[in-house]
Amino acid sequence: MDYKLPFKEYNKALRKNKLLGLKCIHCGTITCPPKMACQECKGLDLEIVELTGKGKLLSFSTHYIAPLGRDNEIPYTVALVELDEGPWLLGNLIDINPRKMDMNLIGKQVTTAGRVFPGDTYSDGPIARPVFSIVE
Amino acid sequence: MRKVVVLGLGHTQFCFNSPKTGVEMLAEASVEAILDSNLTPQDIQSAYIGNVLGTFCEGQATISQFACDDIGCLNIPAVRYEGACASGSIAIREAFMWVASGFYDIVLVGGVEKATAMGTSLATRTFCMGTDSKYEFGTGLTFPGFFALLTRLYATQYNLPLARLKEQMASVSVQSHKYGMENPHGQIKQEISVDDVLKSMPVCTPLNLHDCCPFSDGAAAAVLCSEEAARKISNKKPVYISGIGLATSGKMTSQYKYLPRLRARELAAQQSYQMTGFRPEDIDVCELHDCFSIASFIAAEGLGFFEPGTAGEAWEKGAAAIGGKIPINISGGLKAKGHPIGATGVSQLYHITRQLRGELAEDGVQVDGARIGMVDTLGGDGCICNLILTADGV
């Protein structure tokens, strides 16, 4: 059985700032990032839907130690967002100075776009990751 | 199922920049365990070895077979198990199954890592391989980052001001460093204060350097055997593996609403509690996976020792120290003893077995009257293994 939404397609869409997810035909839950089965009812009958990328910030961490080859990105901020459609999404929080980030950001509304990590020796190609901006 | 006994134990120094190879460290810990069992290498029927990054550390795969050959365990089934930082514990679980089933009577378990050979950058990159390479690594998420995200979720979930939570987290590192001073195999011998933790350099906000365990080199090993074999081999009072549990989960966001709790841990713990009939309050001593200070709270709550959101206060009040409600990480834990990832679960088994044998009075860290002990090990996004050891069997 094929993935309804394989990484390649999800990745291609995110590079164009389009966030795709999967809607479960059985229970209606939205799964994102994609999996083969619905993340709630485990149903395999899913359809691809475009998500708004709107959500609220749940957590974040500014990284001062990076994996090999990514020192030039320091400091960068990894963030966890609850999308309006339900799923939680991991991405990078951008457009805000890490020194000005504190717990008051938690709960703020965000929008999502895509940005490409070009990959490294151990990746098999470029990877689009979600980037979040706070809605003022 | 037959009862399974932990017979002999071996443990190398945990350290930075070991002058020994991974094969040598594993071989030395293994021979120590075999001799401690009153056995010879020829008595070992099969070997189960935790190792994660031998390929990156030294360009060495299948480290198990080279070490077994070196020590004279010739031609036996010797297999490497990988579950990121829980590799050692899943190797123990596997070995347990083979002995409990009656297929083998005497087996070797071990674990080894030589992570400091990679340097911090490559080590950080390879540890990231325990995250989802497509849906997580693109963001640059590291494991301190993973637990940093859980830290803010924890603060929000349990309505704790972050500054207060960070003080509580610092008390974990302070306790681990204090007990680590007494562990002859420990990597870090330095007492630290809450202030030292709070003022150490930021790694992944809000986690500082002293909220994080080090990269480490080292190995640990043990001989497991059937109860019947143990009676024939050794006069030593046996320690039994009475409960085992293992559960996994996928990428962090798959667990979404459940976070900051980790479902795999709670399921693994339920398995070993059910297998033994024990409850959290029956456990006398525990070694749990304190890769980061906040991880200790999430683990201790997931194992049922404290109510969610209250572990920090418990640590501060000494509930996790010797004499407290549940002594935790008296070895110094991953933080001070070190965390050579493939070896960690076996090292935890080593320490709990010695507690149950009552051998640690000389080091000043014996939990008086300890009869039931627990091991908890977490690997990657979610491979969580649990063991309950008993001095009396179940």
Image (tube, rainbow, N blue to C red):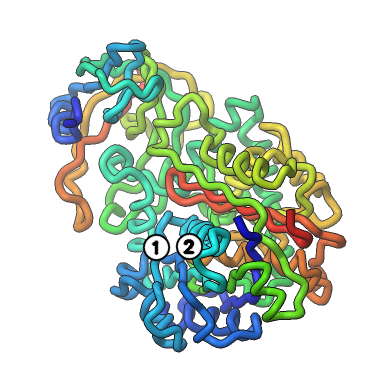
Q: Residues within 10 Å of mark 1 (few under 14, many from 20)?
A: many
Report which residue position mark 2 lands on: B341
Query: Which one is nearer the viewer's eye here, B358 or B55?
Result: B358
* B21 lies above or below A76: below
Q: Is residue A50 left or right of residue B216?
A: left
* Labels 2 and 1 share a subunit: yes
Residue nearer the viewer, B192 or B275: B275
* Viewer-closest of B145 and B322: B322
Q: Secondary structure at mark 1?
A: loop
Q: Residue at x 47, y 30 (%)?
A: A59
CB-based contact (under 8 Å), mark 2 and mark 1: yes
Which numbered tag is attached to residue B238? none
Q: Given the image, on which type of amino acid does mark 1 rest?
A: Val
Q: Is residue B29 above or below residue B101?
A: below
Q: Position of residue B217 (x, y in %)?
A: 48, 72
Callout 1: chain: B
B111 relative to A112, above or below = below
Q: Which mark is residue B52?
A: 1
